[in-house]
Amino acid sequence: MVTYKEVRENEDIKTYIKMADATLESMKFTEHSFAHVVRCADVAGSILEKLGYDERTVELAQIAAYMHDIGNVVNRIDHAQSGAVMAFRLLDKMGMKAQDISRVVTAIGNHDEKTAYPVNEIAAALILADKSDVRRSRVRAEERATISTDIHDRVNYAVEKSKLALDDENKKFILYLTIDEKISLISEYFEIFLDRMMLCRKAAAFFEKGFEVNINGTRVM
């Protein structure tokens, strides 16, 4: 079986992640490189592990999350679909079984909020991990001087802490955010991320859980 460790060590995949992020950097997007994809892999894997899924499913979620943004090397538009096709080629070349590849590419192809749907447990975990990754360190150093004029950079920069937690007792996922309201209004967070939060609600529902957003100690969704 092709492992998450092997995928992380694959130089071709590393190159595509780097180049995809370079493409987005030129377009003034927030960071989509190793910090983002490794965090997504950790969170997606942790979600499925806590929910009692088998070890291979957890590992496939980590692989899908690690590779989910490589399609940005082609174009930001339809990058989920481009990334799924690229992942198929790369994983097939590495010798991964068709059954495993199909689960990974389905998740990658269903992670962008414009076309996404939690079609399986891996896709649902990836959506929750990806859409909850909002944090100050995703704003590139060269963009921090213009946060007053760019709402995406401003909102991300205002987020001092971010954590997605599973509340088993109350059967819900909770995204805890600490936002510096001197930098960005809480309303601005929902202005740009409402679609993502609604998608997280669908992903949580796949697991028969609710989804809640808690900002600065107050439930806001």
Image (spheres, grey):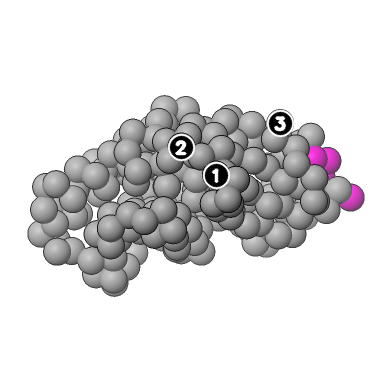
**Magenta stretch: includes residue 185:** yes
Q: Residue 68 colored magenta?
A: no
* Cα–Cα gap, marks 3 and 1: 27 Å
Q: Which residue is mark 1?
A: 171
Callout 1 amino acid:
Lys
Residue 42 screen position, x and y as percent: 45, 62
Q: Is residue 91 left or right of residue 124?
A: left
Position of 106 compared to 116: left or right?
A: left
Q: Which residue is identified by label 2? A: 208
Badge 1 element: loop
Q: How many marks?
A: 3
Q: Quadrant of residue 220?
A: top right
Comparing labels 2 and 3, the label whose residue is closer to the camera = 2
Q: Residue at x 63, y 48 (%)?
A: 175
Mark 1 or mark 2, which is nearer the start of the sequence?
1
Q: CA distance from mark 2 to mark 1?
A: 8 Å
Within 10 Å of disc 3 (Cα), the crowding (few <14, some 14-19, many 20+) is few
Q: What residue is shown at x 36% (from left), y 56% (from top)?
A: 52
Front label number (3 vs 1)? 1
Residue at the image position 64 percent from the left and 41 percent from the top: 212
Q: How many residues crowd around disc 1 within 10 Å: few (fewer than 14), some, or many (20 or more)?
A: some
Residue range of the region highlighted in magenta in the rendering: 182-186
Outermost residue on the top side: it is 115
Look at label 3 and name its amino acid.
Answer: Glu
Q: Are marks 3 and 1 in contact (CB under 8 Å)?
A: no
Q: Label 2 amino acid?
A: Glu
Q: Earlier in the sequence, mark 3 or mark 1?
A: 1
Residue at image point 74% right, 59% down: 160
Along the line of sight, the residue nearer the viewer: 129 or 94: 129
Residue labelled with disc 3: 191
Q: Percent position (x, y) of residue 90?
A: 20, 54
Q: Determine contact: label 2, label 1, CB under 8 Å.
A: yes
